[in-house]
Structure formats: structure tokens, C-alpha cells
Image (cartoon, helix red, strand yellow):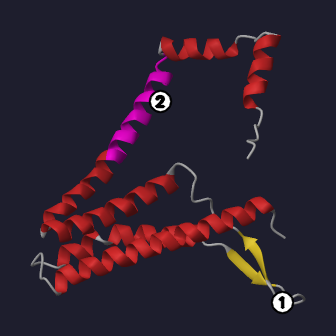
Amino acid sequence: MAGAAEKKQAKYNVETLKQIHIISAVVNLFSLVCLFVFHRPNSKKPYFIFSIPGWFCEFVIEKIGRPKYKKDDVRGFQMLVNAGEDLRQQGLTEYIFDVFYLTEACDIFMCLFGSNMSYLILLLIPIYAVYKLASLWLRFRSRSAGNPTFEQEDNRQAQPKSKRQKKLEARQNRIRYARS
């Protein structure tokens, strides 16, 4: 039996998936109308090639985020088995959403400007990936080289804290409930 948090997550995931599918359907229908009715741009092959990342991201989001239900034989209603991965989490899920939205934006720009050159915007994806990997590598390299700035940070964190500092930190970390 699922708890309240899992039910909220499942509800949020279903809403997010619905929005993603609506956005994808509208943008792709608009793009297909531009391609086949208005013949803008002349070549249709780049649309199909460069839309693959967006379709793949939509598929991945669907697979990891869709809640799974099981029918209860006794009572006859659906029970939540798995709420799916949290689609609000940072990291890889966030990057998947970014790639999806960037691909859809390229499709819209392709229709508006009538040029397949809009797909050059997709070059931002590997550029950003190289930037993130380089910053991670530099951070790792400076730590392994014994950079004094990182050692000083570690020493500051290792110093014992007074009772007052511990109290203030505990008060800041405590959950606050808003009144409505």
C-alpha cells in the first residue's frame, strides 16, 4: 500500500507526463504541417533526424516516470505499486528535460524561420556536457594535487562547533510549516 508521499509523486508524474505528451504532439503536428503543407523547408530529412533526441527523451521520461498500478482482486480498484522516479529531481532527469525542450524549440524555430539551420542550436547539448565534464575534472584534479584552498575548506569544516552554533544549525535545519 502506498503512502501519501508516493501518491503525490505519482499524481505529479502523471501531470508532468501529460504536459510532455501534449507539448510533443502539438509541436510535432505543427512541424509536420509546415513540412508537408507549406513545404518549408524543402528538405524533410533533417527534421526526422534531429527530432530523434526529443522523441528518445520523451520515451525515457515515460518509462521512468509513469506510475505502475495493480488491480486489487478483493476490492476491485487500482493499487499503486510504484510511483515512478521523481521527475523533479536534479541531475540526469533535469538534463533529459532540457534536451527534450531544446529539441522541441528547434522544431518550432525550423517552422518559423523555414530553415534547417535552426538545428544548430542542438550543438549546445554536447558543448554543455563538455563544460560540465571539464569543470568536474578540474575540481577533481585540483583536489588530488593538494590545492591549499580545498584543504582550508576541509579544515574549517572539521573544527569543533560551539553549542550555540550547533543550536543555530539545528534551528535552521528544522522543518517549518506555513500557515494558510
Whole-angstrom CA distance, mark 1 to mark 2, is: 55 Å
Left or right, 148 with respect to 124, comes to right
Residue 22's disc number: none
Q: Is residue 137 above or below residue 23?
A: above
- Residue placed most toward the observer, 95 or 4: 4
| Amino acid bearing label 2 | Phe
Q: Is residue 79 above or below residue 8?
A: below
Residue 120 in which image quadrant: bottom left
Residue 133 included in the magenta stretch of the image: yes
- Residue placed most toward the observer, 40 or 121: 40
Which callout, 1 or 2, points to the residue nearer the camera?
Answer: 1
- Chief secondary structure of the magenta portion: helix
Residue 35 included in the magenta stretch of the image: no
- Residue placed most toward the observer, 146 or 133: 133
Name the residue that disc number 1 marks: 76
Left or right, 60 with respect to 64, comes to left
Residue range (magenta): 128-146
Q: Secondary structure at mark 1?
A: loop
Position of the N terminus by quadrant: bottom right
